[in-house]
Structures are given as structure tokens and as C-alpha cells.
């Protein structure tokens, strides 16, 4: 093995330009060995459809599939089965066989790679500690250990770290220390997240025809679902341009299938699904039974203003796109909140956040919004200027109108849930009838699953909450309701000594005050922190209740809310919400997988957990692909006698019904358990 001069190591990309995912190639006898086998096959001009046998691995994948996984790192480049090219850096590594040089390629292009070495240079760690640092210090949105373990395995195979199986710890080697000294690492304090890149803009770069689309959009004809685009959702506009170039002349469906299989490894059904949004956007038209061609609108798209022009095209045909800018306004907002606003105020029908995420990425690419925190977004200077420019073209039902501060839609007042939510908001500003607000809060907290008791009266708390769980784990909350005619609860109206006396009298674990608003920087918040009292504004409470009806959480999750002091932050519920959403999506996906296989002539509807794993591995709805253990646990639930949605024979599973059948069964159990007295 040759040792290369570290001066010849590839130059590291900026943190934001680095990729997040490790290349998913077989490990076999070690990742470097597997990578060498792939590159040698490519260098030897082996047919791209050839199955590459990796020693020590049972995976059977083609050279083309391997290249697609390596392409984000620019180890190989190409856009079809006929023109894969090995990068000069990868060719050099093949020549010198220096593990540190390969590590430098990975470190230069992948987030949180050499950073792991820096962590281990200070102390040996277990994988969970490393994952925690990635999430908390570097803001990486990982929910499982999958990507962390992938990096650790690469580092181990490169000889840069070792693993102690008796302690479950990883530790850096001498070679790892030497490599770290040569390439360095990114300090998490130096990462500038969510900066507004448009602060110095004096005008918006936008084509006139795209602006006209904003003015002529018909809200009644705009659709909900954008639909399927191949590749990453981050690069929808770039994917579109590739297909526009391909279809500049009449193109048959077979040509599209051939191109899409080569570039993205798509199934025929996925390719046909992609045609639908292209037609909906007016970018292609069918000119014969088998041929398509781009339209004049598609021909207008150019690289110069692509991101903004594409966003205008999307807004013209789909609901709740530029309206998001108005809803964000001067605030910061979470994706889940946007989902609630879209459904409650704009008639959006999608129950999950997949379509909202697509819109978020389109607006981010156009630099109209920016990321301000995990799953939280704010508007940029460009976004504000653009929103002002098109405000007369938007059909808004928005908080930005300032006359409507309540996120709960009033025209659905017939709904029992919305009646309660609106009553909480309205009663919070009815200073003439304190009992009204107290009773509204009792009903509201009951919807969150608490045993809520309206007490009231001198020397007593207004509402007392008990978590409905075993005595060992239960807790109680003393809640004081502060109704006021004004837009904020005043400091003079709150007596913290009395609040804590109520807490002591009722032997409550926590004390909380609920009111219309407490401001953001008021002295009242600081005093609440000093007295260990939680302040819950009405908007936060109604959002929790709305969210609970879609993603029900247990009392243990809500304990995280009441463990806070000062102004409430409901983002502490995000982890629990995402977990349940993921479990729900996994349940649906597994049932759908099994249902689809029912008519398969090869499997005859009988498949194993491992086969479901491979089917779901590339499902873009999951931020992190489900692992085999998650799938097995869900299969055990679905195949249990109580649920009975899935059948099991030895190690194979089969459908006993569709996802609709499962939904009906869970709905039956819900009705059996529901206590309608609270409504």
C-alpha cells in the first residue's frame, strides 16, 4: 500500500454542500474491498446490467444500481447505463490503495464523518452517544442509529477506529488520530444554520411569464397533491429540466421507461405516475397513443430563473404554495402547524405532511423561506418582498390578516372538536365570565386524555388535571385560568404565591397558568421561571389538542410539556409525534405491500419480513428507512388475534384485508373506548 501526501487529498466541500447519506453498497469483507470490486468492474467495462458479486455479501445488485448509489459522492458520474465514468480521485485511490486517501474522499463530501473521529479523540463512546452529538450539536435530523452505524463501519473498515465488543465502545486508532490531524473536522459552533442568503437582494429574479401565472391562478381548479417526482424531493426542479431536455422532440413511453430505469432505477408504474404531474403542470402533452412532447410553457423554463419560475408553476396548479409565505409572516412555524393550517383553513385533504414537505423544499430552493431550526421555517427577505408583490393574487384565509388570530377555522363550527377549540379561544378573552374559560379548559384538557376536574372558588385551583395511569407513574397539574379582555395576560393579574399555594393544597406535581398570550419577552415569563410555573398560551393549547386528534400521545409524553417553566414550548412533543406518525405510516405500508403481493404469480401473496424490508427501503415517505426489527414488531401486532389484519404461516406473512379493512377495525375499537361525555 502506498501512502499519499496529504496535500493531494481532495478539497473538502462546505458543510452545507456535503451529502448526508453514506453510499448504500454491500459491505461484504469490508466497504473498501466492495468499492474496489465495483470500480474495477466499471473500469473493465463490464455491462452495467451485470450483477456484481461482492465477496461476503448475499446482495444481488447490478453495476448500474451500485453506481447510482455512489453518484452523490462523485466517485462515479453519469446519467444512464452507457456512460458511467470513474472520478479522477477514485482512479487515484485504485492506484495507490491508501485507506487514508479513500477516507479523505469520504470526509470531503459527507457530513459527520471526520467529526466522529474528533469525538472519539476525546473519549471512547457508544453509538448512542455519537448519535446524540450528531442530533444535538450538528442539527442532523436522524431518528435511528442507521446512518451513524454506517459511518462507524466505514471508519472501522478503513482502520481509523476500533470496536470493543465487551464494552460496546468505539475508540480511535493511531492511524485515525494521524488522519484527523491531516484533514481536520467541522466544529459544530462554526456551522451557520438557516442564514438568509437574500438579505442583499435589491430585486427578485423572476420571469415575466411566471409572474403572470401567479396572477392568473384559479384557486377553485388548484389540486392538493403535487404527485411523484423521481429522485430527491430537494431537486424536483432539476429533475424536471432533465426530462424537458429529453422530451424536446416526440418521445415514446418506452423511451421514458428506458431513460428512467437507467438513471433512477424506476419501476414502470413509477414512471407512469410521474407523467401525471407533468401533464397537470402543463409541461407535456400527449401527441399520439404512445408519444409525448413538451409544451410552450415547458420550453420557457431556463436555468437562469429556474427555482423561482418552477415555484410559480407549482403555485399556479396546486393549493397552498405561496400562501405558506403569508401564513409564516414574521414568525417561525413548524411543518406540522402548516399541515394543520392547510387542512383547517384551505380545505387541504392530505392527512400526512408529505405534500407540505414538497412545498417546503420548493420554496426553500427558491430562497423564499429558510430553515430556522429542526422542522421549523421562517421567511426570507426575498420571500417577504415577493409575498408583498403577489398579495393581491393570493386567496388567503390567514393569520397574517391579523383579524383572525385563532388557527381553528370558524366555518366548521358544527364539529364538536372545533366548537371546543373555538370556545377556549373566545372564552379566554371574556373577562366578565371566568367560569366560562375554566369550563372550556376542563373540556380541552379532557381531549388530551387527562381526568380534568373543574374546581374554582376562593383558595382553590380552577382546574385540576390527573394523568390517567398507574399510581406509580401518575402526576397532577394545578391549572389557573386567566381570562382577559386584552391580547396578553398582564403581570399584575398573576399572584405566583397564590398559584403555588393552590399547587400545595391539591398536592399537585406541576402548576400552570393558561391565558390568551403572555408575550415573548415579558417580565411575567421571567417570574414564572423563578417560581417554577408553566405559562400556556391559548394557541399552543389548541394546537396540542388539534394535533392530539390526529396523532394521539399518552400522558408520559405530555409530562414533557409540564416539566417546563416559563413560556411553554410544544416542540418538546416532536419526537413522540414523529415516532407515532412513523409507526402509522409503517403499518399502512406493510398492509399495502402484502395486499399488492396477493395477486403476484411468483410470491402468491406469501412474503417474509426481509422481503418487505427491501420493498420499503427506497420508500421516500420515510426520512429513515424502516429497519428489519421495526418491520417484525409491526408484523407481530398486525398478525395478532386481536388485530387480525395479517396472516402468518411459519416465517411468511400474507394479507387478510386491505388498509381500509384495518382502518375500520381500529375505528371500531376507538368507538368502543371513546368517552363522548367530554364533547
Image (tube, grey):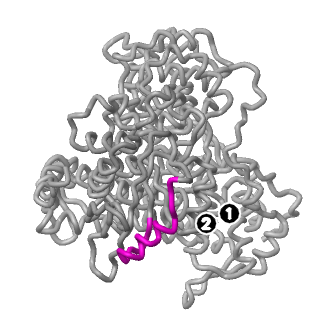
Q: Is residue 50 left or right of residue 201?
A: left
* Circles 2, 1 touching at the beta carbon (< 8 Å): yes
Residue 12 position (above or below residue 183):
above
Residue 510 magenta-drawn?
A: yes
Q: How many marks?
A: 2
* Viewport quadrant of the N terminus: bottom right
- Which residue in the structure is indicated by mark 2? 151
The image quadrant that residue 383 belongs to is top right
Foreground residue among 442 and 400:
442
Foreground residue among 416 and 38:
416
- Which residue in the structure is indicated by mark 1? 113
* Secondary element at image label 1: loop
User: Could you tell me which residue is drawn at 73 percent across and 68 percent down?
Assistant: 99
Q: Residue 506 appears at what percent x and percent y?
A: 35, 74
Residue 449 seen in the current view = yes
User: Could you tell me which residue is drawn at 29 percent across and 81 percent down?
Assistant: 471
Image disc number at residue 202 = none
Q: Is residue 329 left or right of residue 599?
A: right
Q: Residue 405 appears at what percent x and percent y?
A: 45, 35
**Cα–Cα span, label 2 and label 1:** 7 Å
Q: Is residue 266 left or right of residue 213?
A: left
Q: Residue 32 appears at what percent x and percent y?
A: 64, 66
Residue 53 seen in the current view = no
Task: Name which of mark 2 and mark 1 comes first in the sequence.
Answer: 1
The image quadrant that residue 567 belongs to is bottom right
User: Could you tell me which residue is drawn at 82 percent across and 57 percent down?
Assistant: 9
Q: Residue 218 appears at what percent x and percent y?
A: 40, 13
Highlighted magenta segment, given as a residue range: 493-511
Amino acid at each position: 500500500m502506498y501512502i499519499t501526501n496529504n496535500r493531494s487529498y481532495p478539497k473538502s466541500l462546505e458543510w452545507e454542500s456535503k451529502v448526508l447519506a453514506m453510499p448504500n453498497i454491500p459491505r461484504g469483507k469490508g466497504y473498501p474491498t466492495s468499492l474496489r470490486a465495483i470500480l474495477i468492474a466499471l473500469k473493465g467495462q463490464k455491462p452495467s446490467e451485470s450483477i456484481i458479486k461482492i465477496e461476503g455479501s448475499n446482495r444481488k445488485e447490478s453495476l448500474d444500481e451500485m453506481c447510482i448509489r455512489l453518484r452523490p459522492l462523485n466517485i462515479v458520474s453519469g446519467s444512464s447505463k452507457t456512460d458511467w465514468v470513474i472520478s479522477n480521485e477514485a482512479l487515484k485511490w485504485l492506484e495507490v490503495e491508501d485507506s487514508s486517501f479513500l477516507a479523505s474522499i469520504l470526509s470531503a463530501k459527507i457530513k459527520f464523518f471526520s467529526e466522529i473521529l474528533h469525538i472519539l479523540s476525546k473519549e471512547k463512546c457508544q453509538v448512542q452517544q455519537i448519535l446524540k452529538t450528531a442530533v444535538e450539536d450538528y442539527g442532523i435530523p436522524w431518528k435511528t442509529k442507521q446512518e451513524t452505524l454506517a459511518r462507524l463501519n466505514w471508519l472501522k473498515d478503513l482502520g481509523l477506529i476500533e470496536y470493543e465488543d465487551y464494552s460496546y465502545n468505539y475508540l480511535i486508532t493511531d492511524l485515525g488520530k494521524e488522519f484527523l490531524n491531516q484533514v481536520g473536522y467541522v466544529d459544530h459552533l462554526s456551522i451557520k444554520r438557516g442564514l438568509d442568503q437574500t438579505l442583499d437582494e435589491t430585486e427578485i429574479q423572476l420571469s415575466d411569464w411566471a409572474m403572470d401565472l401567479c396572477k392568473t391562478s384559479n384557486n377553485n381548479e388548484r389540486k392538493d397533491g403535487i404527485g411523484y417526482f423521481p429522485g430527491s424531493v430537494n431537486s424536483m426542479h432539476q429533475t424536471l429540466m432533465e426530462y424537458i431536455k429529453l422530451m424536446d422532440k416526440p418521445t415514446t413511453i418506452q423511451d421514458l421507461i428506458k431513460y428512467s430505469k437507467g438513471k433512477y432505477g424506476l419501476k414502470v408504474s413509477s414512471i407512469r405516475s410521474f407523467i401525471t404531474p407533468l401533464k397537470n403542470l402543463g409541461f407535456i402533452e400527449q401527441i399520439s397513443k404512445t408519444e409525448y412532447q413538451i409544451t410552450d410553457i415547458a420550453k420557457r423554463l431556463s436555468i437562469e430563473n429556474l427555482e423561482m419560475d418552477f415555484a410559480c408553476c407549482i403555485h399556479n396548479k396546486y393549493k397552498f404554495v405561496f400562501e405558506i409565505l403569508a401564513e409564516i409572516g414574521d414568525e417561525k412555524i413548524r411543518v406540522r402547524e402548516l399541515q394543520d393550517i392547510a387542512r383547517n383553513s384551505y380545505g387541504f385533504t392530505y392527512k400526512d405532511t408529505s405534500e407540505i414537505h414538497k412545498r417546503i423544499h420548493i420554496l426553500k430552493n427558491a430562497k423564499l423561506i429558510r430553515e430556522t431550526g429542526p422542522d421549523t421555517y421562517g421567511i426570507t427577505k426575498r420571500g417577504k418582498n415577493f409575498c408583498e408583490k403577489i398579495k393581491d393574487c393570493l386567496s388567503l384565509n390567514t393569520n397574517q390578516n391579523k383579524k383572525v388570530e385563532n388557527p381553528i377555522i370558524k366555518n366548521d363550527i358544527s364539529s364538536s372538536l372545533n366548537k371546543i377549540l373555538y370556545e377556549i379561544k373566545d372564552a379566554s378573552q371574556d373577562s366578565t365570565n371566568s367560569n366560562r374559560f375554566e369550563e372550556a379548559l376542563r373540556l380541552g384538557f379532557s381531549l388530551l386524555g387527562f381526568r380534568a376536574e373543574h374546581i374554582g372558588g376562593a383558595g382553590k385551583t380552577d382546574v385540576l388535571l390527573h394523568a390517567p395511569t398507574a399510581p406509580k407513574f401518575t402526576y397532577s397539574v394545578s391549572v389557573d385560568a386567566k381570562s382577559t379582555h386584552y391580547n396578553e395576560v398582564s403581570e399584575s393579574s398573576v399572584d405566583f404565591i397564590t398559584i403555588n399555594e393552590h399547587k400545595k393544597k391539591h398536592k399537585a406535581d406541576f402548576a400552570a397558568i393558561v391565558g390568551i398570550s403572555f408575550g415573548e419577552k415579558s417580565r411575567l415569563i421571567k417570574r414564572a421561571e423563578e417560581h417554577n410555573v408553566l405559562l400556556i398560551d391559548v394557541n399552543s393549547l389548541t394546537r396540542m389538542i388539534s394535533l392530539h386528534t390526529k396523532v394521539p400521545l399518552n400522558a408520559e409524553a405530555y409530562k414533557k410539556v409540564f416539566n417546563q417553566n416559563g413560556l411553554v414550548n410544544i416542540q418538546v412533543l416532536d419526537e413522540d409525534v414523529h415516532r407515532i406518525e412513523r409507526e402509522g405510516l409503517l403499518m399502512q405500508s406493510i398492509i399495502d405491500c402484502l395486499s399488492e403481493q396477493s395477486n403476484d404469480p411468483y410470491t402468491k401473496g406469501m412474503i417474509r419480513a426481509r422481503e418487505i424490508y427491501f420493498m420499503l427501503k427506497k420508500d421516500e415517505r420515510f426520512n429513515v428507512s424502516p429497519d428489519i426489527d421495526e418491520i417484525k414488531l409491526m408484523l407481530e401486532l398486525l398478525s395478532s388475534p386481536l388485530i387480525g389484519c395479517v396472516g402468518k404461516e411459519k416465517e411468511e406473512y400474507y394479507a387478510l384485508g386491505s388498509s381500509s379493512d384495518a382502518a375500520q377495525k381500529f375505528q371500531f375499537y376507538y368507538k368502543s373506548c371513546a368517552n363522548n361525555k367530554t364533547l
